[in-house]
Image: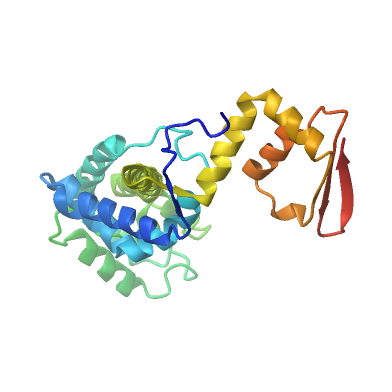
């Protein structure tokens, strides 16, 4: 009764789950980056950005290891998808075009201000290099603009934080559009977080699918089966509590939620038994009677 589940009674105990993880990550990597057809500019950009960030299945596995392994981390607690990012991607490209238009239209006013002594040298130590890099970024030929790390020097703060007290910056549409671009681009950067959640969820599914098809059960699965069985059978819990009336857990700080849940089912609210937990750092024993 305790192990009644979807797992075959002829299951094979898998003592090393690392190869299964690698296999599941490889499957996800191939599906996401190679089998899916990047039919739009957004999908091409998405694939390129994430490939540059994670580089290989091995690096992806290293990055996602805690999310894949620790079942206590709820990766499905919030809905995540790439749907909203396509709109953000289109917005950044449109704003990028508007920055070009504003820069061309307001170039004279901008140069008059930029070439003056109005800007704080703390931020603009090499003004000509900063401006040259800005123009290189602005007139690049890429379908989706690359990141320019000093773009904030051309946003709305140029009128306040970056301008000396005795000077007044011109009210240019360029500064507002640049700031809108920065804000939208920052939202787009959250795509890596979303990718990690989606990838971890799919990789977990791939692992479980492989284990089920091959009749494999890992050590963690055994704990899950025991915990589920105990939670459904008060009779078995009572019998175990009577057979083992006193239990000690040493190094309790290393006990995870699932492991504790098993002991809790057996010993909680049982007048005939006692669970004593001993753990670091102060080696104080706690009794759960």
Horizontal and vertical percent position of residue 91? 25, 40
Q: Which residue shows up at 29% across the image and 49% down it?
A: 174
Q: Which residue shows up at 26% across the image and 45% down it?
A: 92
Horizontal and vertical percent position of residue 86? 24, 39
Scheme by which the image is coloured: rainbow
How many marks are shown on the rendered structure? 0
Q: In the visual, does 49 lie left or right of 43?
A: right
* Residue 87 visible, this angle: yes
Horizontal and vertical percent position of residue 23? 31, 57
Name above or below for residue 240 compared with residue 17.
above
Horizontal and vertical percent position of residue 16? 45, 60
* Residue 103 visible, this angle: no
User: In this orientation, which residue lies closer to the viewer: 45 or 166?
Assistant: 45
Q: Quadrant of the N terminus?
A: top right
Q: Which residue shows up at 30% across the image and 65% down it?
A: 56
Q: Quadrant of the C terminus?
A: top right
The quadrant holding residue 76 is top left
Q: Which residue shows up at 21% across the image and 50% down it?
A: 31
The quadrant holding residue 229 is top right
User: In this orientation, which residue lies closer to the viewer: 99 or 215?
Assistant: 215
């Amino acid at each position: 009764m305790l192990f009644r589940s979807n797992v075959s009674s002829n299951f094979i105990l898998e003592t090393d789950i690392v190869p299964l993880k690698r296999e599941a990550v490889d499957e996800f990597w191939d599906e996401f980056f190679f089998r899916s057809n990047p039919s739009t500019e957004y999908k091409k950009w998405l694939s390129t950005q994430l490939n540059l960030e994670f580089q290989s299945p091995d690096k992806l596995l290293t990055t996602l290891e805690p999310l894949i392994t620790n079942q206590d981390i709820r990766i499905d607690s919030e809905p995540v998808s790439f749907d909203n990012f396509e709109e953000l991607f289109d917005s950044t490209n449109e704003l990028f075009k508007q920055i070009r238009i504003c820069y061309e239209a307001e170039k004279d006013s901008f140069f008059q201000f930029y070439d003056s002594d109005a800007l704080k040298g703390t931020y603009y130590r090499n003004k000509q290099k900063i401006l040259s890099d800005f123009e290189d970024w602005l007139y690049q030929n890429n379908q989706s603009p690359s990141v320019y790390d000093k773009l904030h020097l051309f946003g709305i703060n140029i009128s306040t934080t970056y301008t000396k007290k005795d000077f007044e910056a011109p009210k240019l549409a360029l500064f507002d559009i640049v700031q809108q671009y920065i804000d939208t681009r920052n939202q787009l950067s959250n795509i890596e977080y979303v990718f990690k959640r989606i990838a971890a969820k799919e990789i977990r599914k791939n692992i479980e699918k492989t284990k089920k098809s091959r009749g494999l059960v890992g050590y963690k699965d055994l704990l899950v089966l025991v915990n589920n069985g105990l939670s459904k059978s008060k009779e078995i819990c009572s019998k175990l509590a009577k057979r083992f009336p006193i239990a000690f857990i040493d190094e309790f700080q290393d006990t995870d939620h699932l492991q504790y849940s098993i002991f809790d089912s057996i010993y909680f609210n049982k007048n005939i038994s006692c669970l004593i937990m001993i753990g670091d750092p102060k080696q104080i024993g706690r009794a759960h009677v």
